[in-house]
Amino acid sequence: MQKKLSLVIVGTIFISFMILMIISALSIRNLGIKNAEEKAQIIADLVQDGLSAHMLSGTMEQREFFLNKISTAKGVQALWVVRSESVIKQFGKGFNNEIARDAIDEVTLKTGVVHKNNEESSHTAKLRITTPYVAKEHGTPNCMQCHQAKEGEVLGAISIVFDISEVRTNGILTSLGILLLSIFIMLFVFIIINRSMHPLMELFNSITFVMNKAQEGDYSRRVRFSGTDKECHNVMFWINSLLEKLENTLNDIEVTVKKFLALSPNHQPDLLLDAQAIVHELSDIYQFKRTIEFDEDKEQVYRRIGSILQHDLGLKDFVLIESGKEAISPTIVFDASAQKRIVDPTCRALRTKQAVYSDQFKNICESCTNCAHHLCIPYLISSDFELLLSIWTQSAEDLEHTKEQLPKIQNYIDAARPELVSKNLTEILKVSSTTDALTGLYNRKYLDEYIEKALSQAKRNGIVYGILMIDIDFFKMVNDTYGHDVGDRAIKVLAHVLKENIRDADTAFRFGGEEFLVLLYECEEEMVTNIAEKIRIAFEKSAIQSSNGSTFYKTLSVGASIFPKDSDSLWKCIKFADIALYTAKDSGRNCIKRFNASMVESELKNDF
């Protein structure tokens, strides 16, 4: 690069010198020709004056000596005088046949214009100038005194041939001298420029090398300069300082981010591009975290995680599974492919709490024998529950690509963990506040909230509810005979019977003590009686274990009412079912009584 730049500079100066040399050579040549022309004009004027003097003095016969003397002047190669036709008629042809010798003489005699002509060859260079003599009446001498001519008539001409070879030679020699001087100056300039540019080019080459490495992602290289130039040292210091700050900053970003963010595998060694990717990922995670803070429950958070896995990370076939201490079995909370899958509680990843990859070992997971390429990653959310992400891929290459996405998935799960814990705790608190701790059924507090929603829906859509009020017969005797622990067992048995014998759409409540309420959704009167009878018989056959290991059996009484047939108020229908329950107890217990209006009158009489 240094030599190239030096050659360009020197070459430019050399071309400039050559142009100047050519201009100088042409100027010298033109100056020589100009001098020859001026000399020819002086000789022509001298000959004209001499001939006029000879004519006036009457010594024209002696003009030959005069002309020969002039023709021997330096540089004059030939000289002759030409007479016009009028002069020849008046005075004759003169000495040496003074008539037109060539076309130039003839043209000059006709036009009265000075003619110049250069003749050059490789050996000689000649300049021919033919000057006309024009008759003048006014002036000194007066041509009309001797010549029979008119004003302005051409009387003759003088042709002079000069040898300008010396002029050309001098021009060539001068040009060569300039050329040699130019070459010497060029060499001198080249050496000076080359030496002056050496430190700059050393610095430039080092900067080029360092910047090329930086372009490849290597910011550890530094500019080196061994010269003494202060400006170059300053440039080196500034660039190295910038690179050092950049490298330290990028490394610090990576180290800092690693403390709270799982980084994806680095496929490119450029720290700057890595930092850009990290910033983008942090921004995405921040937006995700801010969004889920306002989600209502865990299910909405799960849908957002599933959406990111589908649309941002490109996963096609996967499920999110929630598993907790309170849950009887794991539950699929998000299914990307909408397939009906059964979650195996013996899943290796759930059991071992470790990631499982299909390429770790052949048939590594017994619960996934039909999955050629899969992976299962457990994520501990809290001590209460964990998530399992199961992913199925089409090929081994897709599996490897999915593994590379795991750090990003980890980041989103980590970002969602506090919200999942918070929302899970909220659900637990809500369940604990609305659920009976002994039976797991809804409590009396939840009944108020449930009826408010159910009533508006029932009136809007014309929904019929069957209402059962259930009570264990002679329950006080159980507590008195076996103790309250056994009484709690009896209550648990009844709660289990209710769960087993009502539909998913139906809702059971522990109304208080040994009394239970069941709301049967969209249930006609005949079905209400059948379900109540089914519950009664199932409890009658259910054994209750005492504290000494023996078992006993109990019966229950049921009161039933229909909403809105008995009343357009659910609360009144519940009251009517309670009245029917007391009627069943008064009727001998272990039976079912359907409410009717006469029971209200009987109740009022008893109260009275």
Image: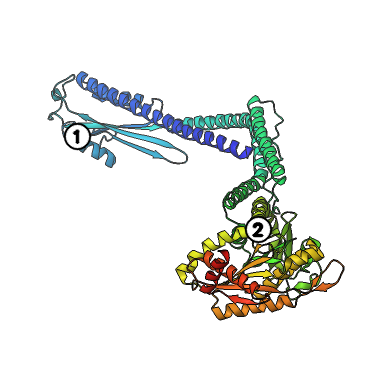
Residue 421 percent coordinates (x, y): 68, 53
| In-front residue for pair 240/494 | 494
Q: Amino acid at mark 2?
A: Val
Query: Would residue 256 be found to the left or right of residue 154 on screen?
Result: right
Q: Residue furthest right?
A: 548
Mark 1: give few (<14), some (14-19) or many (20+) Cα within 10 Å: some
Q: Are marks 2 and 1 in contact (CB under 8 Å)?
A: no
Instruction: Identify whether 507 is placed above or below 100.
Output: below
Task: Please state the horizontal and vertical placement of residue 411, each as a whole percent of the image.
Answer: 67, 52
- For residue 535, side relative to residue 573 (left or right): right
Indicate the quadrant containing the C terminus: top left, top right, bottom left or bottom right: bottom right
Please give the name of the residue rendered at 15% of the width and 27% of the height, measured from the top-left corner: 147
Question: In terms of secondary structure, where does tag 2 sit?
Answer: helix
Tag in front: 2 or 1: 2
- Pinpoint residue 360: horizontal percent, then vertical percent: 80, 66
Q: Can residue 8 be spotted in the picture?
A: yes
What residue is disc 1 on?
88
In the rendered image, which residue does mark 2 sit on? 431
Q: Quadrant of residue 394?
A: bottom right
Q: What percent of the width, then of the height, locates residue 329?
A: 73, 67
Residue at point 68% right, 58% down? 405
Give the position of the N terminus as an image quadrant.
Answer: top right
Give residue 582's quadrant in the image.
bottom right
* Residue 172 visible in the displayed image: no
